Image (spheres, coloured by chain):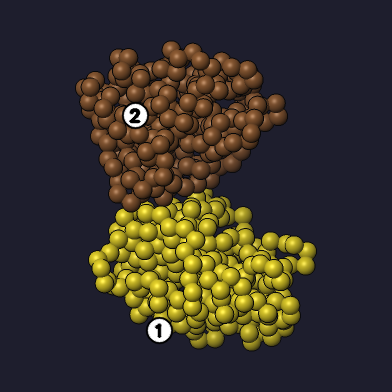
Chain colours: A brown, B yellow
Amino acid sequence: MGLEQVSGAKAFGGIQGVYRHASRETGTDMTFSVYVPPHEDGARLPVVWYLSGLTCTHANVTEKGEFRAACAQLGLIFVAPDTSPRGEGVADDPDGAWDFGLGAGFYVDAAQAPYAAHYRMWSYVTEELPTLIGAHFPADMDRQSIMGHSMGGHGALTIGLNHPDRYRAVSAFAPIVAPSQVPWGQKALSGYLGDDHAAWRRHDAVALIEDGARVPALLVDQGEADGFLERELRPDLLRAACAAAGIPLELRLQPGYDHSYYFISTFMADHLRWHADRLR
Amino acid sequence: MGLEQVSGAKAFGGIQGVYRHASRETGTDMTFSVYVPPHEDGARLPVVWYLSGLTCTHANVTEKGEFRAACAQLGLIFVAPDTSPRGEGVADDPDGAWDFGLGAGFYVDAAQAPYAAHYRMWSYVTEELPTLIGAHFPADMDRQSIMGHSMGGHGALTIGLNHPDRYRAVSAFAPIVAPSQVPWGQKALSGYLGDDHAAWRRHDAVALIEDGARVPALLVDQGEADGFLERELRPDLLRAACAAAGIPLELRLQPGYDHSYYFISTFMADHLRWHADRLR
C-alpha cells in the first residue's frame, strides 16, 4: 500500500501532513490529512477521526478546525479523510447539486448504479484507511475515537454505533442525526442505497439506537443560529432516542452559533479534551 | 463613511465579521475583517492590527490564523486589512507576478504611475482604516498594537517605527526586515516609489532604525525551515540594527517551521499575550 506525502509542515511542535494513496475501496486516488503531535520516539498515540460535512475535503478542517494546539497538548493523532471519491469516471449528482455525489459520500457503501462503483466511503473510513494509518503512523489503533460535522457528524454517530468496541468516544458538531427523516438524508440514502430500508436504518443514528445499538456516551454541540437546524439536523430526535435507550447524551445548544467552522473551532478543544479523557 | 457587513459569525463568544467600504485613499472598495471578543456593554477594547503577506487578503489569517481563542481570553479586537487595492482599473504587475501589484501593496503610498492612483496602503492602514475602526467598533484607539507576516511583517515594523507613540507593541512572523536589500523589496520599492531612496528608507525597518527610529520592544518569530529566510527575510540584518541601536529585540528562530500559516498559528497566541501585556 503506497502512501505519497503531498505536503508536510511543522505546527505546534508536531507535523501536519497531507497524504494521497490509490484506494482499493473507491478505485480512485484518495487524499487525507494527519496531524501527528510531538511525541517520544517509539510512542504509540491514540487516534481521533474527524469526518467532514457536505462539500468539504480534508482541507477545511485542516485549515480552519483549530485542533492542533489541543492535539499537541493532549497527545492525539488527528485524521481527516475526504468526503467522497473524486476524479475521472466518478459519478456526480445528475444536476450537479452539492448535497449528493462529489463531496457528499454520506459515509455509506453505495449499492445503486452508477454510484456503487466508487462510493464506498463506509468501508474506506472504517477498514481501508485505519489499516493504512496503523501501518504508517505512530498510532495506537486500540485507542480510537471519532467525531464529525454535519454529514460527518452523521458519519461519526453511525460508525460509532456500529462499532461500539472500537471507538471509545463519539462526538459531533451539528450532526445529521436521522437521515431517513430529513431531505439531505433521504436524497442521499435513496440515491446510494435505493429502497432497501433495512440498509437505511444501519446508516441512521436514531434508527440504530431504536434498533438497539449503543455507545457509552455522546457529546453533541449544536448552534442555535444554524440555518439547517430544524430542517436537516433535528437534535431533538437524537435526544428522544437517547433518552428512550438510556444513552447518556450531552447535547449542548449553543446560542448564536451557526453551521460554520467559526462554530466548530470554538468548541473543538472541548471535544478533544472529552475524547482524550476517554482514550487514556 | 458607510460600512457594509459582508458576513458575521459568532466565534469564541465574540463576533468574527467581514466588512466592505468605499475607500477614499485607494479609490476602490476595500474589504477587511474584525474580530470583536465578548465584552461588557460600553467597554472599549484594545486593538491589534494584523498585516498579511504577499498574495493574501483579509481571509487567510481570518480562516487560518487561530487568533480568536486568545483574543477572546485577552479581550483584544483583531483587525485584518487587505494587502492591496483591487477591482477594475487597478494596475497589476505587468507580467502578472504575485510579488507586485494585486495582493502585494507593500504598505506604501505609491508615487509612480500607474500605481499612484490606487496603491495607497500606507495611508489606508495608518489613517483611513483606524478612523473607521474607531467609529464603528468598541475600540479604544489609545491602545493599539500591530503585527504582521512576511510583507505584512515589513508593514508592521515600518508602521510601528514611524508611529512610536501610537502602537504600544510591534511583532512579526517571518518579516521582510530590509526591503531595500532583498529582491522582493527592491522590486516593490522601485515599482511603487521609483528611485527616491529617501522614501525607500522610510519604508525599510533596518534603515529606519539606522536613521534613528525606535520602538520600545520587538518580538519576531522566524522559522528556520522557511524557504525565503536567507534571500528575502534576513533577520540577521534586523538583529544587527537593533543591537547597534539598543532596541530590545526578542528574535526567536524556530527549528523546523516554514513560512505558512501552520507556523503563524503555532505562535499566534504567544504574540497576542505579549501584545496584551503591553496594552494593559
Q: Is residue B95 left or right of residue A98?
A: right
- Residue lying at 26% horizontally and 72% vertically, measured from the top left: B42
The chain holding disc 1 is B
The type of residue carrying mark 1 is Asp
Instruction: Tell which of A103 and B189 is nearer to you.
Output: A103
Where does residue A31 sit, x and y in percent of width and height? 58, 33
- Residue lying at 68% horizontally and 79% vertically, measured from the top left: B117
Where does residue A217 sit, x and y in percent of width and height? 26, 27
Q: Nearer the viewer, mark 1 or mark 2?
A: 2
**How busy is the neighbourhood of tag 2: few (under 14 within 10 Å), some, or many (20 plus)?**
many
Mark sitting on residue A77: none
Q: Is residue B217 left or right of residue A114?
A: left
Instruction: Tell which of A233 and A156 is nearer to you.
Output: A233
- Give the Cα separation between the discs numbered 1 and 2: 52 Å
- Residue lying at 38% horizontally and 71% vertically, measured from the top left: B137
Q: Which quadrant does the C terminus of chain B fall into?
A: bottom left
Where does residue B210 sit, x and y in percent of width and height? 54, 83
Residue under label 2, please give it: A170
Please say whether residue A19 is visible from this viewpoint: no
Where does residue B199 sit, x and y in percent of width and height? 63, 85
The chain holding disc 2 is A
The type of residue carrying mark 2 is Val
Residue under label 1, please give it: B165
Instruction: Tell which of A115 and A126 is nearer to you.
Output: A115
Q: Quadrant of residue A1?
A: top right
Q: Quadrant of residue A173?
A: top left
In this view, the residue farthest toward the right is B95
Please say whether residue B76 is visible from this viewpoint: yes
* Both marks 1 and 2 on one chain: no
